[in-house]
Image (cartoon, rainbow, N blue to C red):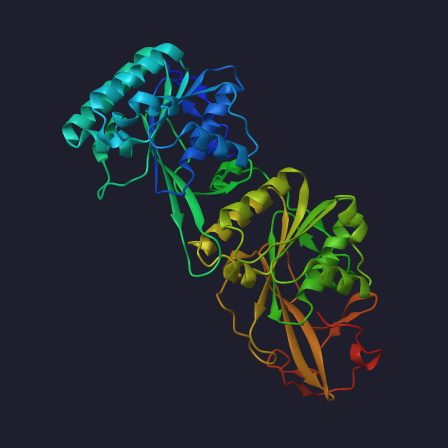
């Protein structure tokens, strides 16, 4: 007897209105349940709650903001800072401004001194009067202070939960974690728990991340997800999981734009692979990558070039002097050339930006450089693992990724801050060497997982016409060591015109 396969259970969802969060939650919060949003002051709980209610208002739902800690005017100020209007959102204050005047002025107590039962009764009356679909309760710390007794506090929260369930409300309880220990019993009462965290480092802005620690009966994207609070609200950046984007990629080979460079790569660059350009500063890594990008742009492809350690104007001016002028491609949007400010972007936001560019059609991505990427985000954790996930995603999307990694030193074996060569599918090594009283350049492909590449060492230089790759350095021994021994009479590229510029 064949057993019927049960259909997956589907619950109606309440979109959060926060960019990226619905993707993390798998579509939003399941409706008619109670959720706990906890985080220290400054993590954006109030902004989160307002966005949640505004998303409901845009769908014709009634929203109610119950505030025990902030006044209506303070909420208006928060909304105005993001360009929002709270029109259509009901706000219930524990003690309204009208109750604080006249004869009642001497008898009104501070919220912390109001009887908990009266407070809860006032909440119930507001709910009966407004009949909301979405509710934000701000905050539980005041409820905890009013109750004084933990058992009484939990009973009141449980009573609120059952009442909200009967009314068909989707409720967000805000908690600022003022208690010394985490209230795990409160976690058990809630249908889902969302944690907001903020980390401060010695340099740069604070980093914020969110984590879904619980969501009953549903699959969600676990782990930490970076988010930012900007004018316009909260924007979350779902953690990139490359396994979710697996596709069959045809590893076709395309030209670098330079026949000699194509030859040492075994035909060119393979789609769906990453190439590491490694060498000392000034050896020509960035210019070579930009030359490959120009070739792709001429084929009509979309590309993205992310600069971490060089200004945009200097790079464009230097490239134009070498005959690589990409300004018109930037102006028409075919090339996204972006200068990223160090310490101002989280790893999650960067991965999200790259993913958005690829989904818009980019087929080649350049990251210049990995050194600056690692140094620009010192507060982020597991940066190498995040880069590994990003490269796996790009490979599965058929994108050619060019990674630039600088090495310390000029001659001899260069030292790297961190060994990232294992992340790449191919590796192009740049080296300086001394000959005839000049400092010359050489390059060699030392690794390729897809092509039968040359194992030769060729001379290389930068000219006013772009990059130039010479013949195999047959007459030299010890080029990679920096001080080779010359054993022949074969002419060098440098025997002609001097190089026009350096990288």
Q: Is residue 331 visible?
A: yes
Q: Is residue 287 left or right of residue 414?
A: right
Instruction: Examine the rendered structure and indicate whether residue 424 appears above or below residue 497.
Output: above
Q: Position of residue 359 (x, y in %)?
A: 62, 38
489 or 134: nearer the viewer: 134
41 or 437: nearer the viewer: 41
Q: Position of residue 447 (x, y in %)?
A: 58, 62
Q: Which quarter of the picture shows residue 354?
A: top right
Q: Which quarter of the picture shows residue 429?
A: bottom right
Q: Is residue 501 left or right of residue 3?
A: right
Q: Position of residue 317 (x, y in %)?
A: 77, 62
| Residue pictured at 61% horizontal, 47% vertical | 272
375 or 169: nearer the viewer: 169
Q: Position of residue 370 (x, y in %)?
A: 56, 60
Instruction: Examine the rendered structure and indicate whether residue 345 appears above or below residue 438.
Output: above
Q: Is residue 88 left or right of residue 200?
A: right
Q: Is residue 284 left or right of residue 42?
A: right
| Residue pictured at 72% horizontal, 56% vertical | 292
| Residue pictured at 43% horizontal, 39% vertical | 44
Q: Which quadrant: the C terminus?
A: bottom right
Q: Which quarter of the picture shows residue 178?
A: top left
Instruction: Examine the rendered structure and indicate whether residue 430 appears above or below residue 135.
Output: below
Residue at the far front in the pictured view: 103
Q: How many tags in the picture? A: 0
Q: Is residue 217 visible?
A: no
500 or 117: nearer the viewer: 117
Q: Which quadrant: the N terminus?
A: top left
């Amino acid at each position: 007897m064949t057993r019927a396969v049960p259909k997956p259970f589907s619950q109606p969802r309440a979109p959060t209105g926060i960019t990226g969060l619905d993707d993390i939650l798998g579509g939003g919060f399941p409706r008619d349940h109670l959720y706990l949003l906890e985080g220290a002051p400054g993590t954006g709980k109030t902004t989160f709650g307002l966005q949640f209610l505004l998303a409901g208002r845009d769908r014709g739902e009634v929203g109610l903001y119950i505030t025990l800690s902030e006044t209506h005017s303070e909420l208006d100020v928060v909304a105005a800072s993001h360009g929002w209007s709270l029109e259509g959102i009901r706000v219930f204050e524990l003690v309204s401004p009208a109750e604080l005047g006249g004869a009642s002025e001497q008898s009104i107590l501070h919220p912390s001194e109001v009887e908990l039962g009266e407070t809860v009764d006032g909440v119930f009356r507001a709910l009966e009067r407004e009949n909301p679909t979405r509710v934000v309760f701000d905050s539980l710390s005041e409820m905890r202070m009013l109750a004084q007794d933990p058992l009484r506090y939990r009973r009141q929260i449980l009573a609120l939960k059952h009442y909200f369930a009967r009314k068909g409300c989707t409720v967000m309880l805000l908690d600022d974690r003022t208690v010394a220990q985490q209230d795990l019993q409160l976690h058990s009462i809630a249908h889902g728990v969302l944690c907001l965290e903020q980390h401060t480092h010695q340099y740069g802005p604070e980093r914020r991340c969110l984590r879904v620690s619980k969501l009953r009966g549903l699959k969600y994207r676990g782990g930490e997800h970076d988010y930012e609070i900007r004018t316009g609200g909260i924007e979350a950046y779902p953690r990139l999981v490359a396994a979710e984007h697996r596709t069959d990629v045809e590893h076709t080979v395309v030209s670098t734009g330079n026949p000699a460079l194509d030859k040492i790569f075994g035909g060119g660059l393979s789609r769906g692979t990453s190439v590491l350009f490694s060498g000392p500063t000034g050896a020509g890594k960035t210019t070579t990558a930009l030359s490959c990008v120009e070739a792709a742009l001429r084929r009509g492809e979309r590309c993205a070039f992310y600069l971490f350690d060089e200004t945009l104007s200097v790079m464009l001016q230097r490239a134009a002097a070498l005959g690589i002028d990409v300004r018109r491609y930037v102006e028409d949007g075919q090339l996204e050339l972006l200068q990223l400010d160090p310490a101002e972007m989280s790893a999650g936001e960067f991965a999200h930006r790259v993913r958005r560019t690829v989904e818009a059609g980019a087929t080649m991505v350049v990251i210049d450089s990995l050194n600056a990427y690692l140094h620009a985000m010192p507060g982020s954790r597991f940066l190498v693992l995040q880069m590994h996930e990003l490269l796996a995603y790009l490979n599965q999307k058929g994108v050619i990724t060019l990674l630039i990694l600088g090495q310390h030193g000029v001659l001899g074996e260069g030292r790297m801050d961190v060994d990232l060569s294992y992340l790449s599918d191919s590796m192009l090594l740049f080296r300086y060497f001394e000959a005839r009283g000049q400092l010359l350049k050489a390059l060699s492909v030392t690794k390729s997982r897809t092509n039968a590449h040359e194992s030769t060492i060729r001379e290389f230089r930068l000219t006013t016409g772009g990059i130039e790759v010479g013949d195999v350095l047959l007459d030299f021994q010890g080029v990679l060591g920096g001080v080779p021994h010359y054993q022949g009479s074969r002419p060098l590229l440098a025997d002609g015109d001097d190089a026009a510029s350096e990288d």
